[in-house]
Image: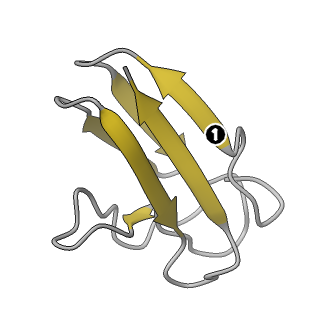
Amino acid sequence: MDNFSFDPPEATVPVGAEVTWVNHDDVPHTATSTAKPKAFDSGALDTDQKYSHVFTAAGQYEYFCAVHPKMTGRVIVK
């Protein structure tokens, strides 16, 4: 999370991979799954806080920042 965007905006990882988001901005951000029910939700992360999630199933996982909904990203798990 940097300059109000996810970097990278898309990542491809193997099943079992742990993905970590770090907030480098001066305002809170979240990494919140768009799936229902939510596959993951970081809650509000302040500057330099981290959140990690292990992806245990193949698929495409879309997510966004609940504070700034125009911030979007995707994790592709193969």
Looking at the rendered structure, the kind of residue marked 1 is Glu
Scheme of colours in the image: secondary structure
Task: Using the image, determine if residue 68 lies above or below residue 72.
Answer: below
Quarter assignment of residue 59: top left
Quarter assignment of residue 18: top left
Q: Residue at 84% across / 60% down in the picture?
A: 3
In the rendered view, does 77 fall on the left or right side of 38?
right
On-image quarter of the C terminus = top left
Residue labelled with disc 1: 10
Residue 22 visible in the current orientation: no
4 or 75, which is in the foreground?
75
Q: Residue at 15% across / 71% down in the picture?
A: 37
Q: Residue at 54% across / 72% down in the picture?
A: 65
Q: Residue at 53% across / 24% down in the picture?
A: 12
23 or 68, which is in the foreground?
68
Residue 77 percent across, percent down from the top left: 38, 28
Residue 40 percent across, percent down from the top left: 26, 57
In the rendered view, does 3 fall on the left or right side of 54?
right
Q: Residue furthest right?
A: 3
Task: Using the image, determine if residue 8 lies above or below residue 26.
Answer: above
70 or 42, which is in the foreground?
70
